Amino acid sequence: MTLDLSIFDTSGGKQKLAAQLFDAINKIGFFYITNFGLSQDEVDEQFAIGKDFFELPIDEKLKYRADLENGGYNGYKPMGIRQLKPGIFDNTEIYNVPKFTSAYERQHPTVIKDQWAAIEKFGRHIHEEVVGRLLVLIAIILELPEDYFLKHHRYEEKSDCHLRYMNYHSRPADVNAQLDGVWVKGHADFGSLTLLFRQPVAALQVRTPSEEWKYVKPYPGSITVNIADSLSFLTNGFLKSSIHRVVAPPPDQAHLDRLGVLYFVRPEDALELRPVDSPVMKRLGYTKAGEGEGMTAGEWVKARVKTNVAKGSQTMQTEQEIMRGVKTKYYD
């Protein structure tokens, strides 16, 4: 399902888009958006920035390593942090750029600082002009005031929203075979929404309600959006966290590294993940005590990050406790 955001500000446009979005976020937690106010040149520029960073020597990149062991995600994550199977570790490099506020000031490499104005313009546009519209649509679906979720995702407030450059390195065929072709097991993301800009290398799959894996097609000029844990907690599962995984690319692309540009949306750290008081949720029976009650969005994110880098994490387990008895599941 694809939303054309160009109609958002037209007469009845928000209501039309909300109606289109209803089934997607309740059944699979996954959809596409187009006409989001950025040119292809602006998107391509961000891919080029990511490529320049990942081409730096490893010693230079490690100067900006994120404080992963303490739940910090901003900065560099090297390959080999997560164990996938005995003797086989993840093949993913990440560089996260936090929000452009004083609370998140930190050192960055020259290839990032030289493009600081373009990165900030890009990140702020995504948050304010794209994410903001999506949060309004979700509020309309839940029959809440249009600004309900906007008030809990303010740019200037403390939250772990960030722009990400991500690079999956190619693997030899024998290693892919040992992993059964699965680079990252099926999982849900931590926050409210994840936005993924189109990538030409086929590797991302989404789990359907019938428990099948389907490739996410790279439609030109689109962003792939998925619902994540925090919105699922806030709606007692009415909004479905998208379960997705990364697999080895098909043979004609197996030799390619997979470069990505993403934006992760997370609620303000202080928000308790208690179910909202929605007329729609009441009518449909989503009224049980929520899993997220008693924990904040900031606590949940930090716990997920720390669990991900703990010794032995991301082995072939199917379930992992995060905090206060709340678990996350992994899918083959």
Image (cartoon, rainbow, N blue to C red):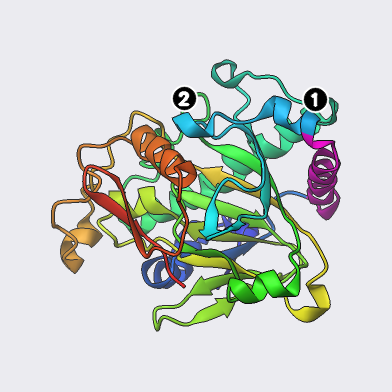
Residue 62 position within the rendered picture, expressed as x and y whole percent measured from the top left: 71, 30
Per the image, the residue denoted by label 2 is 157
Using the image as rendered, state which of residue 321 and residue 263 is in the foreground. 321
Asked if residue 85 is positioned above or below residue 304 in the image, the reply reads below
Per the image, the residue denoted by label 1 is 113
Label 2 crowding class (10 Å Cα cut-off): few <14, some 14-19, many 20+?
some
Region in magenta: 39-58
Horizontally, residue 125 falls left or right of residue 46, namely left
Callout 2: helix, strand or loop?
A: loop
Task: Name which residue lies at 20% across and 51% down.
Answer: 290
Using the image as rendered, state which of residue 44 and residue 72 is in the foreground. 72
Horizontally, residue 211 falls left or right of residue 223, namely left
Q: Residue furthest left?
A: 288
Q: Please, what is the dominant secondary structure of the magenta stretch?
A: helix
Q: Reading the chain from its start, which is encountered first: label 1 or label 2?
A: 1
Residue 157 position within the rendered picture, expressed as x and y whole percent measured from the top left: 46, 24
Q: Residue furthest top?
A: 102
Asked if residue 257 is positioned above or below residue 23 in the image, the reply reads above
Label 1 crowding class (10 Å Cα cut-off): few <14, some 14-19, many 20+?
few
Asked if residue 299 is positioned above or below residue 3 in the image, the reply reads above
Q: Is residue 181 magenta?
A: no
The dot on residue 3 is: none
Residue 215 position within the rendered picture, expressed as x and y whole percent measured from the top left: 61, 76
Using the image as rendered, state which of residue 89 and residue 267 is in the foreground. 89
